[in-house]
Amino acid sequence: MDENFIGWLQYLWSLMPIMMKGFQITLELFFKTILWALPLGLIIALMNISKFWPFRAIGKTYVWILRGTPLLLQLFFVYYGLPYVPVIGVVLDRFPAAVLTFVLNYSAYFSEIFRAGILSIEHGQYEAARSSGMTGFQMMTRIILPQTIRRVIPPISNETITLVKDTALVNSIGLFELLQAAKSSVNRDVDATAFLLAALFYLIFTLVLTLIFNAIEKKNSKHEIR
Amino acid sequence: MYVIEALDIVKKFGKNEVLKGVTLQQKKGEVVTIIGPSGSGKSTFIRCLNKLETVNSGTIRINGETLVETVDGKVQYAKERDIRKMLTNTGMVFQNFNLFPHFSVLQNVMEFPVTVKKQDKETARKRALELLEMVGLKGREDAFPIQLSGGQKQRVAIARALAMEPKVLLFDEPTSALDPELTVEVLKVIKQLAKKQMTMIIVTHEMSFAKEVSDKIIFIDQGVIAEQGTPEEVFDHPKSERLHSFLQSYHT
Ligand SMILES: Nc1ncnc2c1ncn2[C@@H]1O[C@H](COP(=O)(O)OP(=O)(O)OP(=O)(O)O)[C@@H](O)[C@H]1O
Ligand SMILES: [Mg+2]
């Protein structure tokens, strides 16, 4: 085999530790965002369809602000801006600032998906539940939300894959993660290999997620629609 | 005592007065069938009985308990909690079945007793299996609604309603979404229930079925009961011109 190629493979291998370290942060940011943004998104969605108008007002404003401004701006605001805000004035470390921003931002997107999902459930499902004497809570938890969750899996999976790529934005507040790991290696070694390796990490990650979501969708398809 | 007592029910949708004072008093074991032209208010009336629609005035009692009454022109519904309790006494079967697609057939039938009545799962399961056998669906308990024909779905829906041991069953055009062959199997189940003295209110366009199964026929036209009586009185000796021409439309 070509000596240069073997040398390149060895270089590639030598990049692995720092890349893995970066990827670990990316993963952590990803999972923490999903873990909090999904339930928060559901709560915002429920506020948005509430009969109580103050809830709706809060929910709509929340979604409007977080979907209507750049994620990058939100990130800067939380990390660089919050310390100067009177009263609140907290200084967050890079990682918590990134998680907080992503949770807020993604919960707004998820809430719109949940809202559309809930509204897509046929009126007859509510009537069947109501006419049996179910409470509103029983109706939501037993009948409406389980069906909603099945229906929103495709759009949620799209959004989740976008999130994988959006995690790279935290590079802008100097948080060390996968992209930063690659960038620093490229700068140090004057060699583009680390970027290719980073791309490979993202591709494998999104591929795994796609496969998982496909499997879930397939499992659900047997009792979707009526 | 009446199982269902609906007195002088008025219901408006905006300015459109759909029910203009409809009264029904039904004893235990009676089967009442409501017929009438499209848009006459049949569905609206039956849906008022289990509060899927709220009335503008009138009184409704279910099994002696007051769901709603009108005092000095003011409509007063019972407390939310009491209403939910009353609703366990009225089972509803819908034109479009409204089965829960995420539950199996068995889970569909067990859902209300377990969640609403807090029945233990084993008791609910046993009862559900009995009911499924009764409606001719033994062996299909693990199927999902999507795998069933319309007729099978509707029979599951009947079993689901019966699982609550209601005092009265309400049917809103239970066979209107079904092909003729499938209609037969659903009507067979309802006839069986009539034989067992199940109290039922049925809205239907199946005239020969209505004649066979009912103790009383109510003909609603433009929001009022235009005529009522035994099947013989209503079908064989209609008094009003409106009923006469309505029945004519079914013979041609
Ligand atoms: N939710 C609603 N909002 C406004 N108008 C309604 C509503 N539901 C029913 N109506 C109107 O009330 C009238 C009676 O409707 P209803 O569904 O009770 O008739 P029906 O006798 O059941 O007719 P069909 O045989 O076609 O089912 C109709 O004019 C209908 O347009
Ligand atoms: Mg109708």
Image: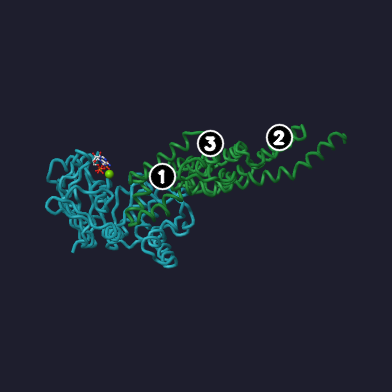
> Badge 1, how many Cα within 10 Å: few under 14, some, many 20+?
some
Residue labelled with disc 2: A195
> Badge 3, how many Cα within 10 Å: few under 14, some, many 20+?
some
| Residue in view at x 18 percent, y 41 percent | B17
Real-space Cα separation, disc 2 to disc 1, in angstroms = 45 Å
Identify the hue of chain B: cyan
Q: On the rendered structure, is B33 left or right of A80?
A: left
Residue labelled with disc 3: A71
Ligand 1 located in image quadrant: top left
Mark 2 vs mark 3: which is more N-terminal? 3
Real-space Cα separation, disc 2 to disc 3, in angstroms = 23 Å
Q: Nearer the viewer, residue A123 or B243?
A: A123
Q: Quadrant of residue B125?
A: bottom left
Q: Nearer the viewer, residue A41 or B77?
A: A41
Identify the hue of chain A: green
Q: On the rendered structure, is A22 left or right of B195?
A: right
Numbered disc 3: secondary structure: helix
Which amino acid does the dot numbered 3 rest on?
Answer: Leu
